[in-house]
Amino acid sequence: MATPVGHALAGVAWGALVGGRRPWFGPWRDVVFFAALAMAPDLDFLPGLVIGRPEAFHHGVSHSLGFALLFGGLMAWWGARRGAPWRWGLLGAGMYFLQVLLDWLTLDTSPPRGVPLWWPLSGRSFMAEPWLFDDVRRRPLAWATLWHDIKAAGWEVVVLGPPAGLALWWRRRRLRAAKE
Ligand SMILES: [Zn+2]
């Protein structure tokens, strides 16, 4: 998996691009909302935490096209009650699949390597070769591990920061123009 930094930046970029001309919660609250929503697939840690093995379900079918569509459907249903099913559905499905894609682009050293990108069409796990993002390490508990993760997150900022910044700038202009 990429670090939360990378996921948040990708989520902000996607949200700014498809978020439309009206703020959802407010211009700055939206940035927080998009960043938080981008973490949704990694909630697959939670069922594992309950049984004492956080990694048990991580990067399972929760990281797939099938789950992205399911999440998009759920968001669309939620959005329908606010009169904007497409807007919410597109935001949710795209945001979710983007996190799956980032994880596909990330080095994974523990089998099965990668994520089951196309589930339920195929149960195979895929990892990009060559990968673009370094893995996140949790062990051993040492400065070297922390330093490794900081460098991994720094690289994500280099790659994903500019598109996120550009998308935000473009959205701010649109929001302002819509107000006038
Ligand atoms: Zn993930």
Image (spheres, rainbow, N blue to C red):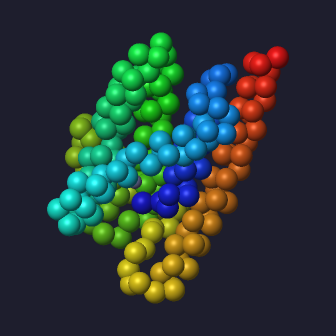
| Whether residue 143 is visible | yes
Q: How many dots with numbers?
A: 0
Q: Residue furthest right?
A: 180
Residue 39 shown left or right of residue 164 in the figure? left
Place of residue 97 in the rendered image (x, y in percent of width and height, measured from the top left): 43, 40
- Going 58% across and 44% down the picture, which residue do you hit? 32
- Going 51% across and 86% down the picture, which residue do you hit? 143
Figure quadrant of residue 92 = top left
Depth check: give the residue in front, 6 or 85. 85
**Position of the N terminus by quadrant:** bottom left
Depth check: give the residue in front, 152 or 43. 43
**Which quarter holds ligand 1?**
bottom left
Place of residue 104 in the rendered image (x, y in percent of width and height, measured from the top left): 42, 53
Residue 40 shown left or right of residue 45 in the figure? right
| Whether residue 13 is visible | no
Depth check: give the residue in front, 113 or 30. 30
Vertical placement of 179 versus 166: above or below?
A: above
Place of residue 109 in the rendered image (x, y in percent of width and height, measured from the top left): 35, 70
Q: Residue furthest top?
A: 83
**Position of the C terminus by quadrant:** top right
- Going 22% across and 66% down the picture, which residue do you hit? 53
Figure quadrant of residue 59 = bottom left
- Going 30% across and 46% down the picture, which residue do you hit? 62
Place of residue 82 in the rendered image (x, y in percent of width and height, measured from the top left): 47, 17
Vertical placement of 141 versus 91: above or below?
A: below
